[in-house]
Image (tube, rainbow, N blue to C red):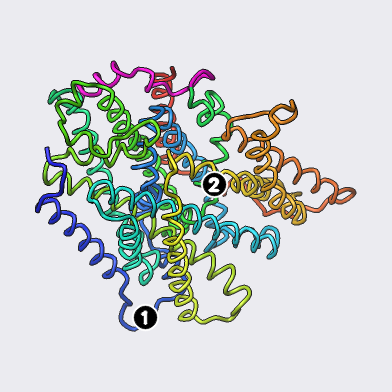
Amino acid sequence: MNSNFELLDYIIFIGYAILILCVGLWVSRDKKGHEKNAEDYFLAGKSLPWWAIGASLIAANISAEQFIGMSGSGFALGLAIASYEWMAALTLIIVGKYFLPIFIEKGLYTIPEFVEKRFSKNLKTILAVFWIALYVFVNLASVLYLGSLALETIMGIPMIYGVMGLALFAAAYSLYGGLSAVAWTDVIQVVFLVLGGLFTTYLALDTVADGQGFVAGLKTVYEAAPDRFSMILDESNPEYNNLPGIGVLVGGLWVANLYYWGFNQYIIQRTLAAKSLRESQKGILLAAFLKLIIPLIVVIPGIAAYVMVNDPEIMSRLGEAGLKNLPTAEQADKAYPWLLQFLPTGLKGVAFAALAAAIVSSLASMLNSTSTIFTMDIYKEYFNKNASDKATVNTGRISAAVALIIACIMAPLLGGIDQAFQFIQEYTGIVSPGILAVFVLGLFWKKTTNKAAIIGALVSIPVAMYFKVAPKGWSSNPIFVDIPWMDQMGYSALITGFIIVMISLFQNKGKNDAKGIPLSKELFKTSSGFNIGAFVVMIILVALYSLFWS
């Protein structure tokens, strides 16, 4: 076992980097006699096929927060964290059937653009600022931090250099090529991501079983830590506040998932770039099936690391290398980087390329979507309404570069957080309940008014912050109960929705105005292939939860 990179590992990793850069720059080139316009840069010319959309959705979604953060949560609490992935598969089906047809029919570039069409320019601007701040200060910064943490743990690269290296790599092709470069390189990235992840899982389980293979390793891990395979945690579990039992299935996780997959610009943007609605829905279905296997490559390794660390016999086999950067209950996010050092020469390069692919693809996607929102919803709205295609594309590139610089400054400041995946979800959960309430009511309740939506969006932040902060100081008062943050998201969404409904009813008193968007049953009709695929996904989910319920 080698704890350091060998020449073959460097060759494989450098080859991966060159391949991504070459493909990214090649698809970014301007065709002869054609200069990139806004549709080319921000929506890949609306030319993406279903398999590219499905691959790009997964590559954009799976990043350091999954490989590092979710493996850390697997180490700390076990398979229950996989609910994020498995419930996401069902969420994707809902988004593909009920949300996507509306967005594509409206010909949207950005999610805030829908808000303007349904409500007003003021609300669009409020949400656009929300999203830009969230992407820069939480998403981009955390991905850079976790990625550089992996570089530091595995290769000894100081964090500041890791941050800059990852940022420059992502910027090298995404800033110039836009969504087209991001989406087509994602197809390659997802191959590295899945194969590299499977290699790491296999080697971890094989090590646990002392060379007896994958199945024997999985059996050994299950027998050594059966408590780590419970999907529904009870209140006695110390991690109950992060994953509150049955509430995960019927409560706040739906807020997180519907917001993320349905109204998150850097996810939904690639579906808007499809050749057609049917093509986009097929891509969504592919992503749903891929989500079912993601826990195998991001959660199981964390559980295997937990078993290894707590087994003296396994640790003695690992020798001195096993004591380097050892994950602990307080530093669970070291689990995945710690495992990588035990991979044999060659596979280590593949696995590290997979991790880099996850990081860089997500960075590129977030950068592109941040620049899309800023350019289309802020710059063209308030600074240059008649901006040419050249000015629009250049603004997109500049705004992405500025966002990346700010995120690079913020990333090292996140040092010291544990279970970063939970950190990201918790702070995203401050914004997501209000946005979800505004969108769901705006889509499906015609009487939702602009004023009610604006008030709801603004009030949702202090409501969410109340649930997050108040219990810590006022828990002695029965009014202020200490509840899991996932339940806080659910309550915040319900309260915000209630506020919007009450204000809308008051404004509509005595009126019979149907101000909502027109919807027809025909709009939501899906192909038989989509329906069969969705049914299979649901059957698999029922089987998984039945198997690992407790």
Residue closest to the eye, 136 or 321: 321
Pointers 2 and 1 in contact (C-beta within 8 Å): no
**Amino acid type at mark 1:** His
Residue closest to the eye, 219 or 443: 219
Residue 458 rendering spot, x and y as whole percentages: 70, 52
Residue 165 rendering spot, x and y as whole percentages: 30, 62
In the picture, residue 2 is in which quadrant? top left
* Mark 2 closeness class: few <14, some 14–19, many ≥20 residues within 10 Å: some
Q: Quadrant of the N terminus?
A: top left
Q: Main secondary structure of the magenta part?
A: helix
Tell me, for residue 34, which label it has, or none. 1
Magenta stretch holds residue 263 = no
Distance from disc 2 to disc 1, alpha carbons, whole Å, reads: 40 Å
| Residue at the spot 34% in from the left edge and 84% down from the top edge | 33
Residue closest to the eye, 63 or 77: 77
Left or right, 302 with respect to 141, comes to left
Q: Is residue 72 above or below residue 31?
A: above
Q: Quadrant of the C terminus?
A: top left
**Amino acid type at mark 2:** Thr
Residue 480 rendering spot, x and y as whole percentages: 71, 31
Q: Is residue 213 above or below residue 416?
A: above
Q: Which residue is mark 2?
A: 428
